[in-house]
Image (cartoon, rainbow, N blue to C red):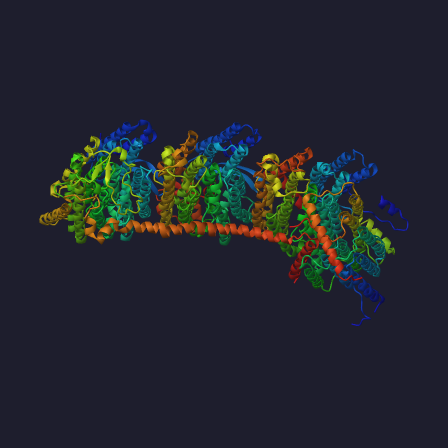
Amino acid sequence: MRDAGFPLLTFIIFTPLAGAVLVAVLPRRRPEVVRAVGYVATAATLGFVGYLLYAFDTSASGYQLVENHPWIDTLGVRYLVGVDGISLFMVALTALLFPIGLIASQTISERLKSYTMWMLVLESALLGVFLSLDLILFFVFFEIVLVPMYFIIAGWGHDRRVYAALKFYLYTALGSAFLLVGLLTLAFLHAQDHALTFDLRTLTVWAPGGLSDGTAKLLFLAFFAAFAVKVPLFPLHTWLPDAHTEAPTAGSVILAGVLLKMGTYGFLRFSLPLFPDASVFFAPMLLVLATIGIIYGAVVAAMQPNLKRLIAYSSVAHLGFVVLGIFALTTQGLEGGVFTMISHGLTTGALFLLVGFLYDRRHTFNISDFGGLWKAAPVFGGIFLAVAFASIGLPGFSGFVGEFLALIGTFIVHRPYAVISAVGVILAAVYLLWAYQRAFTGPADGENATLRDLKVRELTAVVPLLALSLFLGIYPKPVIDRVEPSVRRVICGVERGSDYKEPAVATRRAAVNRDDCAHMNTRELAGR
Amino acid sequence: MIVSLLTQARDVPNITTPSVDWLAVSPEVALAGAAVAIVLLRSIVRRGRWVYPASIVLAFSGVTAAAALLVRQWSEFQDHGAITTIAGMLRVDGFGVFLGGVVVAATALALLLSVSYIQRERLEGPEYLALVLLSATGMLAMTTANDLVIVFLALEILSIPLYVLAAFDRRRLASQEAGIKYFVLGAFSSAVFLYGVALVYGATGTTSLTGISRFLAANTVLDEGVLLIGLGLLLVGLGFKVAAVPFHMWTPDVYQGAPTPVTAFMSSATKVAGFAALLRVFQVSFPLFRNDWRPAVGALAILSLVIGSVVALVQDDVKRMLAYSSIAHAGYILIGFAAAAVTNGGASARGLQSALFYLLVYAFMTIGAFAVVTVVARSSHDARHTLSEYRGLGTERPALAALLAFFLLAQAGVPFTGGFVAKLQVFAAAVDARQYYLAIVGVVAAVVAAFFYLRVVVTMYTGGEEPADAAEPGRRPLRVDPPAAAVLAVTAAFTLVLGILPGAFLDIAKDATFLIR
Amino acid sequence: MDARDLLDLVWIVPALPALGAAILLLFGRRLGEPKAGWLATGLMALSFAWSVVMLLALRNVTPRTHTVDLFTWFPTGGLQVKMGFLADPLSITFILFVTGVGTLIHVYSLGYMHGDGNFGRFFAFMNLFCASMLVLVLGSSFLVTFLGWEGVGLCSYLLVSFWFQRNSAAVAGKKAFVTTRVGDFGFMVAMFLIFSELGSLNYSAMNAGASKLAAGTATAIALLLFLGAVGKSAQFPLHVWLPDAMEGPTPVSALIHAATMVTAGVFLVARAHPFFEASGGSALTVVSIIGAATALLAATVALIQVDIKRVLAYSTISQLGFMFLALGVGAYAAAIFLVVAHAFYKASLFLGAGSVIHASDDNQDMRTMGGLRKYLPFTALGFIIAWLAISGVPPFAGFWAKDEVLSRAYFAGDYGVWIVGTAAALLTAFYMTRAVWLVFYGNERFEAVDAAEQPEKHGFSLESPTVPAYVPPKPARLTHPPHESPVTMTFPIVALAALAAVGGVLSLPFRSVEFLTQWLEPVFADAPKIDVTSFVAGSTLEGISVVFGLIGLYIAYRIYRQGIPSPEGDPLPERLGVAGRLFQHAYYFDEIIANLVRGPVYRFADWLNRGFDLGIIDGAVNGVATLVRDAGGRLRRVQTGLVRNYALGVVLGAVALLVFLAVRAG
Amino acid sequence: MTVEAVVFFVAAALALGGALGVVLARNPVHCALLLVVTLVAVAIFFLLQEAQLVAAVQIIVYAGAIVVLFLFVIMLLGVDREESLRDPIPYQRPAAVALGAILLGEIFVLAGRTWATGAPSVRGSVRGRVDGQNLGNVQRVARVLFTDFLWAFELTAVLLVIAVVGAVVLARRSGQRAQLDEHEQAIEEQITAAELSEAAEAEEEPVTP
Amino acid sequence: MSLAALDITPNYYLVVGALLFTIGAVGLLLRRNVLVMFMCVELMLNAANLTFVTFSRALNDIGGQVIVFFTLVVAAAEVAVGLAIIVAIFRRRRGATADDVRLLKG
């Protein structure tokens, strides 16, 4: 591991927060300064994350750049952060989407100061979620995320924002309530014979053997409640369309791009390592839900009259692929899941940006209000189409890599789910192209005929996402190489903790020579 | 003095008076002394212009002295252990000093909040201050009480001034209604409590908390019925004070009607004192019966959580909503209490610690919230606190709105506020004590509670684009006086610090649990 | 330079058009009309030239296969997929005709797209298409092929709906993409199965491992792949998109929907033939049956079409059916031969049709044409040669190729298939003859009018592509007399026609001159040979084939030699009676699907959205919220404001508490 | 039957009868007077149980001071009107009586035979010698009051201060009249209306002396 | 058991105490007049006092009697303050029924 020489992860987490504090003391009458601070803070974070990508040791499977300090001693809670291949790209995605979100927020002038503050707080919180290795610390970040997001939706959203924001808050808070009880139970059961700790690495070593079968299942379900709502898994998804539709553009981007990943990330980071046996036991249930989500999300998306709602439901389908991949419990599946998380962040983020830009021009999301936009705005139409195809999962774009891996990873262990889910690939084309056809093609009239094309600012926001999606679609290796060791660690942990054996075909020629799980010692399995 | 006079009486054989550790009673003396001084000043000087300022000075010197003495007590306790004095009726241990400290802090903040309020509402200042101080005296006595009789007396000492304070604003009918309701029900519950004390006395032959404990440890009571009734009635009486459901019904009415700073004082300090008694009585005297009363406490906790949270949902009055929320908070503390009632020593200590820490946090965040309410009510004479009054506060007074939002979010248990750490501790304690059902009800109630806190927050940040109708009579511009600002600053700071770096305070709370027996 | 070193550079073939696409997408608008087109065309020509180099290089390599890996695409555990290209006779054959035909059609487009507002974009898409198609055929693994496969699908979408302001075009593009996606589903699942069985997606692994698979597994893989091919190659029942795809500019129809993309299915089956072989024949039987059925059904539908492009579209479907028929009987090389020959004559026909349409103000209705031969001499020349080729008149390429296919079918013992194929051949000759006579011969059924009177210019547009119902003809009113197209357009027509004329030499059915068959030999070496049992039998079959072709030709000639009296006067519908209506509506296939989608499927989806999602799930969520709030309201009423009542609560609590304690105390 | 028994039963009858009277009498003045009966009866119980000083204080403080204060307030406020039998909450009265019965039942059931299970004296007995001396009741009480209960005794001082301050501050007739805001005003009117109707109702009912 | 042999054990007093307590409690729930409600509280306090004294004798512990003194003081203080509140609130009103003050509810 290359040593950063300074607490890099702490810098990453708290740079945006520092920006938020700075914004708080700025005068309200200087919006340009507020904006500048926002950009600088997010850009600096992105810079740190860039350095993190450089400093990250590709071959290591464990957590790197770990920082470990006591926080709440009486509970054994620690400020424990670290990064591995799985979280690395979640962090990168977060750091990337925030400056873009701010660019997209250029149109916001009302209460700009608080808006910028909430955005920065949100970024810190999200980065914290992905970097925490202490269960309580994770929960703290997991929970605090709700607050800025709530305010962003309720404060700068559209017509039904209050309802949507509240629904978002209550839904997800209810889920995480069970998570809290679950993780406390876990830690205290561990504490019967050991020192009380919430250190994920310690608990990962203990939990698979230390918990009784029934307890592990109950705890799995407690964790599941929180993560499934966040994902959101069918049938816990109804907060999502409302939240997305009512959120301001940047809010939707972050919501789709990063927030939803908290759930799937949680499955990967906590559910699988801590409760391997229960994970294997419940995997069919999750696969069923994921499969339903994929098909259901796509079908319902097709029926939406509102462009944003449509994309929201498409997220349900996409995240279904992620869950499918994760609970396939194969190397390809997990990597596909992780990759789809990244890819969905890029493409759906871009879609929301574009829809937001459309709203800026036409003040509506209704597909029926549009028509023939491509004519007046060729660049807009072209980029929208490209992003739509990226989202559909056309090979050559990142979406394909993720979905293909998730499906193939599922197929080798659970064929029916993969086959049914593959239908979702067709449906994705149906709903997006149908929407595109209705909004962008055909004859244009009225305002649609004079739509302004994308401006440079807007292009700066979208093009990086599209370009990255294209790049990762053609050359996903840099990501997969970094994800693979960590994914292998997770799978080996599951194998060690249950009767499950990953099919040989998934690993036969693994890139890492430590792929043979038998060679992984307990320390390595814990990610130390 | 009286004691010495009496000992000189000839026909009475010598009475050996109990030794008095003056340090142990000094905080009470300081507060009561300040109160008496104010009363004297008032009765001698009558209506001088400087009487009120002087009273303020006296009040704060009393509080400061009490605080200083509590600190002294704490170090004394740390070095030499608990002080038991005056025939064992008084026991100064970590538990008492800790909660005493919370009481004094709450008192100081409530006084600070009242200073300008009194002038604004043209109330009789010196009496007001004296009554607050006297009530606080009772609370302090409560925290160190080691005898049911002291508990009873302290209960009365803290309650009676509150009856008066609740009814203090004679121009508002609501205030007087609050007073009379509080009084009737308070007296009723005191009577119940007293009957409970009587029965416990009969069953154990003593009223001393440690005495009861010793008796029960040494003897097996075959007919434990009377003891159980007594115990139950004690729970009822104290449950009333801490506003646990179903003994809570006075709370919304009284909190709503009383002058807002009084509400702040009541909701924070009284609850602390009530829990001080509850925890001490049950943990010290009846640990052997914990399997009998723990489920009851658990039931009270669940009822408080559910009813407090659910009914708060439909409130339109902010003060009333905060009252219901304080009922829900009592539920959380009761979780900690129930968690403390287990044989596992570590878990028990954790439960107690969590309850103590929760009280600390709760005091600050609730005073903070009521402080904002006090300031906002400036525009409508403390009579109206409907949610619509808060519409547009976010644009009109962003700082004030942000603070209220912060306090409410803290109460909702959002991370990086004291409220979160407090709830975390409570749930951890419940889990540690294997009282999973309490933890689950607690977390779910927290989610429901978030709904009504957020409702207020949203109201503040919506609407208000139209200029605040300045034309409306009685609507004066909001002004935050320095004392109120100080209260806001201190409570906000504490709520934040307790959320981010709770370590030191948790350690103190932990120390406070050790020597309760 | 060693031949293998040279073959390492095979990636240049797709890279050139890809580069062109990239440049044109970014700067196409700035380059402007002629330059963008010339750039694209030039790059295609270069690509063709390089393909020829590759051909020459491969000839010097034994064994005749060479794999180039550029970089690792999927480096995941056991699934390692390289971005790699496979040069072997099959792929080289394909790249040659793709780049060759592609270049010609690019040239044609220079003229055809003249004046279009999105000239640059068109060429960008065309280049992108060629690049994707080349990746498809060059891919060294199923996944790389799939990359190209989806790429051509994308370009097809883009180009079909190129004139997106027309709703019909936009809808047709979407329909094309979605329908082929149904096939892609099969392709994907096939890949899953291949990976889980073989642990690799590479063709080399397939060649090594396919024969060892259980027959059932191999059949499953084969049929799934065939599903992909059915979608892409517009075979029954996924053929519905192709006629609608004629909404695209005609060069697109020529290149994508006749010459190249639609043959990708054929390529795939040929490429994956080890699985088909390993299936023990059952998969191949399915292929041949589907192929034969499609050939016949599409031919019947083509009989009665009035839109010149639709005739060609159904003809394409039918011809593709022939190809699958060939594949199904194991005559892989014959299928490829037909692919190539078909590329020549069908491209020529489409380009000719485009020229006709171009000349007559975007009119596509054959009933309002007639006698155009004298206005469009070069176009007519090319068209007529190609017509003879497709009708199976010797010695044109179509004859040799079709004959090869049918005779193989016969010799393979699939007599049913052979009969169906022969019948389809007869029909082919008929409908093509009908088209030629309606367009180029007979009476002129159009009139020139002043430009001022000309109503809003609209192409022959289908109101909704999903219902290709009978459209009453509008007499074409032209602003000017029909005129021959510029040389950029006529040259490709004639050139392709010439290729169609002589293309037969690629593989004459005589031992030593079966060039193509021999060339492809290494690829299909493991497939069982179909022996032509005797020269006599072969010759007889050829004779029968020719006779049938001529019969069809003659019947059409008899009917249409005078043209038709008026646009409404086509005698064919009447003569065919009920069958005519069936053909006209393409067996109502589209209508059934459309009604299904608009009816039950839509209703179900709508219910899922409004009834289930908003009603039940969200209703439950909101219901719980309302329930809690109602509970709050009800509990609130308990708080009566009366002190006595509050005291009652206290007593109630006390009583309950004591009851509990009493119960515990026993 | 011992004298104690006779006295006990008479006193018990008085005490309970007085208590019931307090609850049932409709006129507050009657209630106050019936309260005195109970208080005196309780004082008799005290006497019966060797608590002479307490008995005396009970009479003086309770009957003499507290009840008088009650009567005084009744007269001052002129609230000696009889209260209506109608209860706005229909379930209140039956519920109250039922709960009372249950409560009583529970107390008896739980208490069973033995009520006083505690340890005998720890701080001075009621009877017998203390420090070798035979002391009167007053002395016995005093000894304990000023030793064991010293802290409680001191605290009562605070209580008295509170009583004084509280009573004074509340009863002081300050110059300012209540200024009701509109909301309160409305309710005020409502109440007055209700009062009037109730008063009318009360007049219709036959007055029980 | 004949009446003559009847021994008045502490239980007799305690039962009377319990009855008084219950009557007081129920009375508070029944009555609408604040003053009478308050009287009922006094009944309850007296019940407690009686119980203290009875136990005092039963346990031979003078402490129980001492506690009664404190109760008396408390009762007195409560009465003083309570009546003051009642006076303050009902000065302007004719009735003293607790039901009348009902601004606050819900």
User: Where B481 sits versus A326, above or below?
Assistant: above
User: Where C216 sits versus A259, above or below?
Assistant: below
| Res C488 → quadrant | top left
| Res D120 → quadrant | bottom right
In the rendered image, which quarter contains the N terminus of chain A?
Answer: top left
Query: In the image, is C615 to the left or to the right of B387?
Result: left
Query: In the image, is A231 to the left or to the right of C313?
Result: right
Residue A511 appears in the figure: no
Q: Residue furthest left?
A: C536
Query: In the image, is B48 to the left or to the right of A280?
Result: right
- Residue C7 at what x, y percent from top left? 24, 34
Q: Residue furthest right?
A: B10
Query: In the image, is A504 to the left or to the right of B300?
Result: left
Residue C75 appears in the figure: yes
- Residue A464 at what x, y percent from top left? 41, 33
| Res C108 → quadrant | top left
- Residue C295 at what x, y percent from top left? 21, 48
In the foreground, C178 or A519: C178
In the foreground, D192 or B258: D192
> How many numbered discs, if any?
0
- Residue D39 at what x, y percent from top left? 81, 58
In the foreground, D117 or C88: C88
In the foreground, C371 or D177: C371
